[in-house]
Image (cartoon, grey):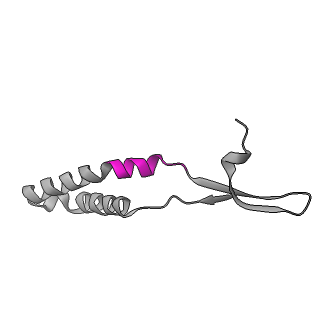
Amino acid sequence: MDAHPREEGPEVREYVRLTSLRDDFGAQMPPASRQRLDEEIAALEPAWTEHRNARERVTVRVRFDNGFVLDGADAVLFTPC
């Protein structure tokens, strides 16, 4: 079994960057800049929530008795319902 990390899209990376900026320098920012930053973060929040709730992709490699190898198959295919 191989676990593949979730891929971060540009919106997720921007959300992380902006929240870090707000956490580090928000208290020192002028009110208008802080408000604009909060609006940008709010616009990116759905992408962040989707990324955070996404499950990690797990793949398996299966070697059958006849020598056939199935590599990179989604683990969901091999889990009982």
How far from the left and from the top, in percent, is residue 36?
Answer: 14, 56
Percent of width and height locating residue 20: 30, 61
Asked whether 80 or 66 is in front, the reply is 66
Residue lying at 73% horizontally and 46% vertically, measured from the top left: 78
- 21 or 24, which is in the foreground? 21
Quarter of the image for residue 68 reads bottom right
* Nearest to the observer: residue 69 or residue 40: 69
- Image point (63%, 58%), residue name: 3
The quadrant of the picture occupied by the C terminus is top right
In the rendered structure, the answer to whether residue 51 lies left or right of residue 21 reads right
Q: Is residue 50 magenta?
A: yes
Q: Is residue 54 left or right of residue 2?
A: left
52 to 70, vertically: above or below: above
Q: Position of residue 71 (x, y in %)?
A: 73, 62
**Residue range corresponding to the magenta coloring:** 46-55
Secondary structure mostly seen in the magenta stretch: helix
Q: Is residue 54 magenta?
A: yes
Residue name at image x 8 percent, y 60 percent:
30
Residue most toward the right?
A: 66
Q: Is residue 64 left or right of residue 71?
A: right
Image spot of residue 41 (x, y percent): 25, 54
